């Protein structure tokens, strides 16, 4: 299997697997009490966002490597989460340089949109009020992941609704772009 096809398969598997986790945990949320399932849902949704974003970066890089997508050297370096330095002997050393979630997500989806000829779609999605829910959802995720008090472990109905809106916004953005990315392969019978 080519690297390009492997990246495609990985992207689909990660999205479907993590989407299933988010769906299962969402179904377990109680309308009358806050607790474990609320936190589990938020963590599952953000695992999906982060996992899919990483897999999308790998897919973009694989497509660029075989000449299907055009990306700049700067985009390639950022998407691969690598920085390089030169030692006194002239030897190049690479090191991982992880992107912060929000800037990395936006870069990934912007580059993906451009590679698909969907820049306008991606740009308009980032101007949509669903993106504000996505940004606010990051605050909720941070509260759950790094609580500073017992009170921060409990999520409000509004917090959960914010994350649900963020999830719907993400699904809408990603599924449209994913469909476009895989359309030519499905029409030609390529895998």
Image: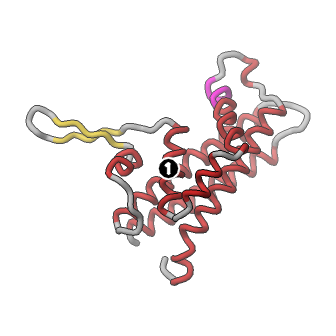
Decide if residue 175 is on the left or right side of residue 67. Answer: right
Q: In the rendered structure, does residue 147 fall within the stretch colored magenta?
A: no
Decide if residue 169 is on the left or right side of residue 177. Answer: right
Q: Quadrant of the N terminus?
A: bottom left
Q: Main secondary structure of the magenta part?
A: helix
User: Which residue carries the number 1 mark?
Assistant: 108
* Above/below status of 183 relative to 89: below
Residue lying at the far top in this picture: please name it.
149
Decide if residue 9 is on the left or right side of residue 157. Answer: left
* Above/below status of 161 relative to 64: above
x and y percent of residue 10 in the render?
50, 61
Q: Which residues are magenta?
A: 142-146
x and y percent of residue 45 in the render?
67, 44
* Above/below status of 139 relative to 25: above
Q: Residue at x 64, y 51 (%)?
A: 124
Q: Quadrant of residue 47?
A: top right
Query: Which of 26 and 189 lies nearest the eye of the viewer?
Result: 189
Q: Quadrant of residue 159?
A: top right
Residue lying at the far right in this picture: please name it.
32
Are there few (<14), some (14-19), or many (20+) residues within 10 Å of tag 1?
A: many
Residue lying at the far bottom in this picture: please name it.
188
Q: Residue at x 53, y 59 (%)?
A: 11
x and y percent of residue 96 in the render?
35, 39
């Amino acid at each position: 299997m080519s690297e390009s096809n492997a990246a495609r398969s990985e992207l689909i598997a990660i999205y479907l697997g993590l989407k299933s986790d988010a769906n299962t945990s969402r179904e377990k949320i109680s309308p009358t009490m806050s607790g474990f399932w609320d936190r589990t849902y938020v963590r599952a949704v953000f695992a999906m966002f982060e996992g899919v974003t990483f897999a999308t970066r790998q897919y973009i890089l694989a497509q660029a490597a075989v000449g299907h997508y055009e990306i700049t050297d700067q985009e390639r370096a950022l998407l691969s989460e690598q920085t390089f330095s030169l030692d006194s002997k002239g030897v190049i050393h690479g090191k991982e340089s992880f992107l912060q979630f929000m800037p990395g997500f936006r870069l990934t989806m912007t580059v993906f949109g451009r590679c698909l000829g969907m820049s306008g779609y991606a740009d308009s999605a980032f101007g949509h009020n669903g993106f504000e829910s996505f940004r606010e959802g990051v605050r909720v995720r941070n509260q759950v992941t790094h609580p500073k008090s017992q009170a921060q472990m409990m999520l409000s109905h509004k917090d959960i609704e914010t994350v649900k809106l963020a999830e719907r916004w993400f699904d809408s953005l990603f599924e449209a772009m994913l469909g476009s990315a895989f359309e030519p392969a499905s029409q030609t019978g390529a895998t």
